[in-house]
Amino acid sequence: MPRETRGYLPQFVAVMYAYHYAPEHNLIPTEPQFAWDTESFTADHFVNLPTVARHLNLCTDDLEALNPGLKHGVTADYLKLQTIHLPADAMPLFLEHKDSILYLAKTENRERMEYLARNTLGSTYGREKLVYRVKSGDVLGRIAENYGVRTGDLRQWNGIRGSTIYVGQRLNIWVLPNQRVPARQTAVAQTHRTPSRPVPEGAAVHVVQSGDSLWSISQQYDGLSIAKIKELNGLSSDRIQPGQQLVINVPKS
């Protein structure tokens, strides 16, 4: 298994053991919890859950528990059609005042929540993913400096404890839109880049590293296939070169 997921299996086994042998270890639930009847709606903009909870006379903690995927109790403004779950018995009141509730939830406390989302350690809010392959002489702090991120962010994104990295290791790095590739990467790209289509504005780019193949690159990004890489970059073969920039995602107009 990849190093960042290697610890999940023993944790799963431990949870199942505790579940089956709880009485033997005096593990007794003090208050059983039952699933709520819920209904959902979708939002295509920022929504502040505490505001929704207040106007529906709900407990904010309960509403956030029904939506564990929403960090800090808000939806991400850059993602579209995010699903929000409500208790079923609160849905009639929500539908009756939907427009006014969503307007208030879109404006209240937005700046503070966005600030927290952007600055939380390991946050990917509003950022684009790049993959960097570690070279001889690299250290974690210097890589972070080159890409304008914090060392702690690199650790969080890649499941690294301490500062040990090894040559050839792939690091996920989330950078701000339109952030320039470090000078060393740019120089390599200019030297070895093969003719290709111009990079569309705002497109996500992968800089080919030594040892990369179209297949290995496709495995690093959800929903990306070899055929899609070829289509986006006008490639007629599977040949790529270190330093070559490949478009991996084009924003919808």
Image (spheres, rainbow, N blue to C red):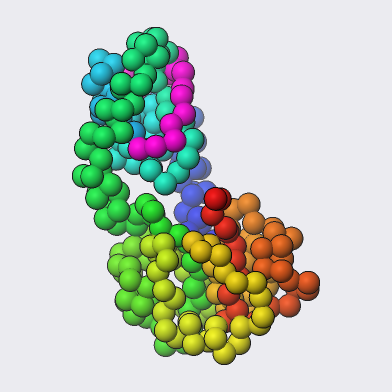
Rendering coords of residue 200 (x, y %) = 56, 65
Question: In which quadrant is the N terminus drawn?
Answer: bottom right
Front-most of residues 194 and 133:
194
Q: Residue at x 74, y 60 (%)?
A: 227
Rendering coords of residue 94 (x, y %) = 36, 15
Rendering coords of residue 65 (x, y %) = 35, 29
> Is residue 45 on the magenta stretch?
yes
Q: Is residue 94 left or right of residue 234?
A: left
Q: Is residue 27 left or right of residue 3?
A: left
Q: Residue at x 37, y 52 (%)?
A: 125
Rendering coords of residue 163 (x, y %) = 34, 73
Front-most of residues 24 and 155:
155
Q: Is residue 73 left or right of residue 186?
A: left
Q: Quadrant of residue 49?
A: top left
Can you say whether 146 is above or below 58 in the image? below
> Is residue 92 on the magenta stretch?
no
Furthest residue in direction right, as rendered: 236
Range shown magenta:
27-46
> Can I make out residue 237 in this image?
yes
Magenta: main secondary structure: loop
Can you say whether 135 is above or below 149 in the image? below
> Can I make out residue 59 in this image?
no
Front-most of residues 122 and 243:
243
